[in-house]
Image (cartoon, helix red, strand yellow):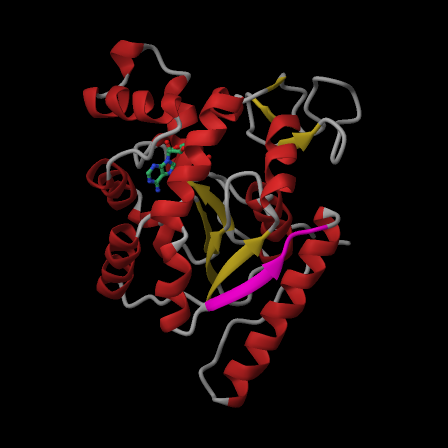
């Protein structure tokens, strides 16, 4: 049986609780996904959700969901946050952290989590460590997807996202069965506003300055797992699973009791 998950509480806030609790999970994996925009984190998160049963929790998706609301339905802080996002800049840490704090139930979930796009700065990473510690939770791994910059730019230009369910495609690398239509829900596929060339440039600069130092932060904590993201998404997934498997073995040898890997259907 394929692992199912529901991200309502994450995307829309705690007033919209989950309808499906992750099944097929023997023990939860709690993972952070790192890598420059366009490296394929969203796609890997989707594939890993099926393999591990953990929910894909993307902070960018929360903002994109809020963007679909009428202005009078959004908080002033969210409206301000969307302006940062439109320019390709990072939303201030205080706003992001408040949003994550409101969604703590998703981090406590028995199905585990795959955090994508958070943390984005060392300050956010430190805050996440504190939030998890308060709940007696720990991260199992931080997957760092690596890709040369010219490939990143090519991937972003061709990326298309489902407006409804946020599934990610690429016009050549991962095309939908029917052009412009999501395979999963039939929703329309669109180019994200921040995938336009002028926003991409800002995002890459911001990544180098604010987010790249995170790799050092997590390396020092012994959590960093580098994964080459070249070639197909499926090959990257395979490398990721092998890397997680070897972490699991190391952890069981040192008797830390890491979670068991759960594989969905191939
Ligand atoms: P993403 O989908 O992760 O590329 O995020 C899209 C945009 O949302 C980013 O360019 C930022 O403007 C904003 N954003 C998402 N997550 C964060 C975060 N953790 N900290 C600051 N800004 C964020």
Question: Residue 265 is drawn in which quadrant?
Answer: bottom right
Let me know if residue 226 is in the magenta part: yes
Instruction: Give the quarter the ligand 1 occupies.
Output: top left
Q: Is residue 8 visible to us here?
A: no
Residue 130, position in %: x, y? Answer: 23, 61
Who is closer to the viewer here, 56 or 108? Answer: 56
Who is closer to the viewer here, 150 or 142? Answer: 150
Q: Residue at x 59, y 81 (%)?
A: 249
Q: Residue at x 31, y 25 (%)?
A: 84
Q: In the picture, which quadrant includes the C terminus?
A: bottom right
Task: Give above or below for 173 relative to 209.
Answer: above
Let me know if residue 10 is in the magenta part: no
Side of 3 relative to 92 (left or right): right
Side of 48 relative to 117 (left or right): right
Residue 66, position in %: x, y? Answer: 36, 23
Question: Residue 92 is drawn in which quadrant?
Answer: top left
Q: Residue at x 29, y 11 (%)?
A: 71
Magenta range:
224-230
Question: Residue 39 is drawn in which quadrant?
Answer: top right
Task: Give above or below for 77 relative to 220.
Answer: above
Q: Main secondary structure of the magenta part?
A: strand
Residue 180, position in %: x, y? Answer: 70, 17
Residue 193, position in %: x, y? Answer: 48, 19
């Amino acid at each position: 049986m394929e692992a199912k998950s529901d991200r309502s509480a994450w995307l829309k806030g705690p007033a919209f609780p989950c309808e499906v609790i992750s099944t097929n999970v023997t023990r939860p994996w709690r993972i952070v996904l790192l890598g420059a925009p366009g490296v394929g984190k969203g796609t890997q998160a989707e594939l890993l959700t099926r393999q591990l049963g953990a929910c894909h929790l993307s902070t960018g998706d929360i903002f994109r969901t809020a963007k679909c609301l009428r202005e009078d339905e959004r908080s002033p802080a969210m409206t301000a946050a969307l302006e940062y996002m439109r320019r390709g800049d990072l939303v201030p840490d205080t706003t992001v952290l408040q949003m994550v704090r409101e969604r703590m139930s998703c981090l406590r979930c028995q199905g585990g989590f795959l955090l994508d796009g958070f943390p984005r700065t060392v300050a956010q990473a430190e805050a996440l460590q504190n939030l998890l510690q308060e709940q007696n939770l720990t991260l199992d791994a931080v997957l760092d997807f690596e890709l040369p910059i010219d490939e990143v730019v090519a991937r972003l230009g061709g990326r298309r996202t489902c407006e409804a369910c946020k599934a990610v495609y690429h016009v050549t690398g991962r095309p939908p069965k029917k052009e412009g239509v999501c395979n999963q829900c039939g929703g329309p596929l669109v180019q994200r506003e921040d995938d336009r060339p002028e926003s991409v440039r800002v995002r890459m600069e911001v990544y180098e300055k604010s987010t790249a130092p995170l790799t050092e932060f997590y390396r020092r904590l012994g959590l960093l797992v580098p994964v080459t993201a070249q070639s197909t998404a499926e090959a990257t997934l395979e490398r990721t699973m092998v890397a997680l498997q070897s972490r699991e073995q190391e952890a069981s040898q040192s008797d830390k009791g890491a979670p068991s890997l759960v594989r969905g259907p191939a």
